Image (cartoon, grey):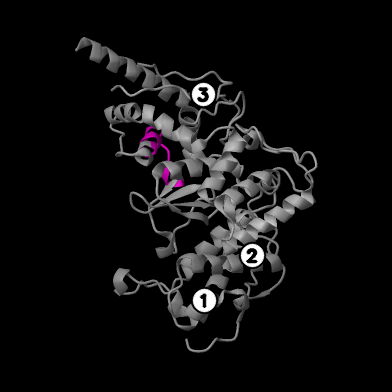
Amino acid sequence: MEMFVMSSIDSQTPPQFTRPGPSSTPEPQRFQLPSTPPETADSPSQDTYSVPWHKFPSKVMDELREKKYIMGKDRREMVRIVAEDYLHKHPGRPGRQKLRELASMIVGQYPASFKLTEPFGNKPFAKDGSETLFRQLEHRIENMKRPQSSLKRQAGGENSTKKRPRNSDLYGCVAWDPIIEGAVCREDLLSKRDELKRAFQTQDLQESSVRKLMTETYPIQREILNDDDTTIAVVKDEWPFLFEVPHLFDHASKLLSFSVQNKLAQELSKKEKGINDFLDSKGMKTGEGPIQLICGISKYFKEDSYKLFHKKEISADPEVELPVTPCILIRGDQQFKIAVDGLLVNDHITSPIVALSYVFSMFYVCNVQYPPEMAFTLEFMQRVFFGVNPERGSKAEKKGKKQHFIPPQVCKLVSQLKEFECKQKESEWAI
């Protein structure tokens, strides 16, 4: 029986741990911003703002006219449009009172579409829904104004200045910024990109042809992914196939030099039971299956698994705010969705191993740092299940002066697992 040991730091081999055995459209209104002193130094100087009703999707405007409650994707799209339009017209960061004024004006225009009620239509809350809309606008604008979002890319495309990437971007990658070589010209690659975009809409390309084109255009995929100013929404629009499971895994395999999905399946087959037995002995086991295993590990580290797993249906709850980092939305035992930066990028995954492999890949494909609330759990997954053990650096945000190559908390768990395995072997021999 193999012992549970950490790999050498330059190895890509994971440590081994074996099992021990209204009716018409109202005219757009304008609201007067408060005349009080600005709340921040960069607050807008303009005094009025008009809600861009004309930019709302026709479906949303129909729902507003029909007095239907706006929720889910429609509400998020509405919030996105208003936030982007406001910041375009007023570049500074708005104060909270200004956002409350804006939310109240929107709700006042279509009160029936925002009123909060008890479940099943029982008695209404003593609220009109403006506070909820205010919080959503505030959350969206905070994400947009964050100076160094965890989703910012660090290398530019053809018309932007190349920047030195963070260590966390390069961390574990072998083909992060590939060079366009040989007779291949950028115009040819861009033409293939456009062909892929058309094919995604028409579905007239065979899967083998799509995979070939995606492989050939990998260098310019990395360019947009490494662009500091590119959002996930833009990437999804330019490369829609990238977020389909086989193509994301192909991209991740080239980026990391191994098959993420196969590696996870292989390592779980050898280590899942042993780790679960250890967690059970500590009263930290949360259930059976790969996702419950990761939740148990996060419980050991006293981390917040909510940053990686969501069990609420976001389309049914307008107040659900997703992390900006990659996360899995869980609907039952065999239905999983993936969201990044609050955007749903894949909604048809039926395997927990595929879901875990997908969300792990997204941290590397999209240059996202591990969220501090789940950093130890993700680093444990990275080293123990995926065998990513670079010589230096970290995918987690570093705080404080003292830095560690491997977090002591992760080393401690590895050591405890090894000791636990040895004790179980001794018990077996004694019998």
Q: Which residue is located at x 62 percent, y 25 percent? A: 392
Q: Secondary structure at mark 1?
A: helix
- Is residue 296 in the magenta section? yes
| Foreground label between 1 and 3 | 3
Residue at the extreme left of the image, as rendered: 431
Q: Which residue is mark 2?
A: 84
Quarter of the view holding residue 278: top left
Answer few, some or many: residues within 10 Å of disc 1's Cα (few below 14, many 20 plus, some between 14 and 19).
few
**In this view, 256 is above or below 200:** above
Q: Secondary structure at mark 3?
A: loop
- Residue 235 place in picture, x, y as percent: 63, 54
Chain part drawn in magenta: 294-307
Q: CA distance from mark 2 to mark 1?
A: 19 Å
Whether label 1 touches label 3, CB < 8 Å: no
> Mark 1 or mark 3: which comes first in sequence?
3
Q: Secondary structure at mark 2?
A: helix
- Residue 292 place in picture, x, y as percent: 35, 40
- Residue 48 place in picture, x, y as percent: 67, 75
Quarter of the view holding residue 353: top left
Q: Nearer the viewer, residue 40 or 77?
A: 77
Q: CA distance from mark 1 to mark 3?
A: 51 Å
Q: Nearer the viewer, residue 179 or 313?
A: 179
- Residue 325 place in picture, x, y as percent: 53, 47
The amino acid marked with disc number 2 is Glu
Q: Which residue is mark 3?
A: 13
Residue at the extreme bottom of the image, as rendered: 24
